[in-house]
Amino acid sequence: MKQFKLKAAAAAVAAVGLGAVHTAANAAAFFLPYQGASGVGNSLAGSAALGEDASTVFFNPAGMSRIQTGQVSIAGHYIDPSFKYTDTGSTGPAAFTGGNGGSFVPNSALPALFAVIPLNKWRFGLGISAPWGSQTDYAAGWRGRFQADFTEVKTININPSVSYEFAPWVSAGFGLNYLKADAEIERSQLLGGPSEGRVVLTGKDSALGYNFGVLVNLSEATRVGVSYRSRVDLDLSGRQTVTLASGGVAQAFDIRADLSLPAISQLSVVHALNDRWTLLGDLSYYQWSSIQNLTPRNASTGAPSPSLDLNFRDTKRVSAAVNYRLNDAWLIRAGLAWDQAPVGNAEARTANQPDSDRTWVSLGARWDVSAAHRMDFAYAFVSLAPSSVNHTVTNGGTLRGEYDNSAHILAAQYTFSW
């Protein structure tokens, strides 16, 4: 029976991993925090100190020390966004004629899988998920098509990890991250007179990063977790193609571009008031300033193409949550979070990444079906602050308008132990 469960776990890992390769979930500023329903229900508060299930592989591998049996957590997230643009006087190519782009961020599904196997004071873990990604897809002929029309970043991350319990009060963990990334950017371009062509840029790369963490039990009631996820430097290689309105190819050549995904530092606290109430808190710091622009260069000559200037700044995220043990079978969660956007002002905001500060409100529940089987359910509403754009691009005009963005997140997670 044990061998059968191990084989089933391996098959689940493979299935979810293959699904993640083809999934591009949408989230502001590239980072996808949807790494399990248990975390979503708490607005990610306490996620580096909780060590509640195998998803701790992502948030803090040291938390694996709290898992006493073999365990696999399989999670699915459904994101239902509402992103809307209203023009307020754009100027530029073709006088920016056209509509407002419709609902330009599509619904998406995002799987994740984590596994932990204990061996004495050691724990060995594996995570397969998509921690970075975004997609904007404006309606054909919209006003801002000369700056951005379609933008997609999708990733899959494979994260083997190990932890060691040095003493009952302190554990440390370390993980390697193999990240595979694909990117595509499309926009319109004037080709002389009123004729519009289309520019398509694609790129892909794989790179290694790492993450580590420490978990300290200050008392039986209080735990503190500290974790760090490294910057990942990508050297994207791909193709730039310019097509005519007739569909013919006007230009095509190989390109390269550098993209550095930011490092993340996290401090979490979990405090049990009594047998029923637990408080959770979290402070995270994102080094988004590693992304200033994305400049494709001709792979043969080194000549640059027009740059996508993002000018990101470092940001922080603050969250708090409470868990209530209703009875032996049910745990209820609620959380709040404020997530600062790396976009500082209207001039820096782009149609590719129309981000703004976000507020999370979340609810969740855990159902302990038995000692071996557990279900988690969560809902979060993410409200992005109303924002404006006043972004100028060479040969792309000035895009002036207002964004009104929000998203609903539904998550479910199945955890089984053996």
Image (spheres, grey):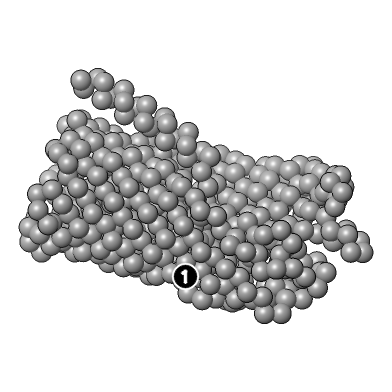
**Residue 267 visible in the picture:** no
Left or right of residue 418: residue 406: right
Q: Secondary structure at mark 1?
A: strand
Q: Name which residue lies at 34% across and 67% down.
A: 361
Q: Give residue 149's quadrant in the image.
A: bottom right
Q: Choose top left, top right, bottom left or bottom right for residue 248.
A: top right
Residue 163 located left or right of residue 192: left
Q: Residue at x 79, y 53 (%)?
A: 198
Residue 125 versus residue 77 in the image, above or below: above
Q: Position of residue 148 (x, y in %)?
A: 69, 61
**Is residue 368 among the parts visible in the rendering?**
yes
User: How far across and down, in percent of the image, does residue 204 sit?
Assistant: 62, 42
Q: How many marks?
A: 1
Q: Residue 214, how many percent across, how many down?
A: 26, 50
Does residue 361 sit above or below 70 in this rendering? Answer: below
Q: Is residue 3 above or below residue 407?
A: above
- Quarter of the figure with the C terminus: top left
What amino acid is at disc 1?
A: Leu
User: Residue 188 appears at what percent x and percent y?
Assistant: 77, 58
Residue pointed to by mark 1: 384
Mark 1 packing: few (<14 Cα in 10 Å), some, or many (20+)?
A: many
Q: Residue furthest right?
A: 193
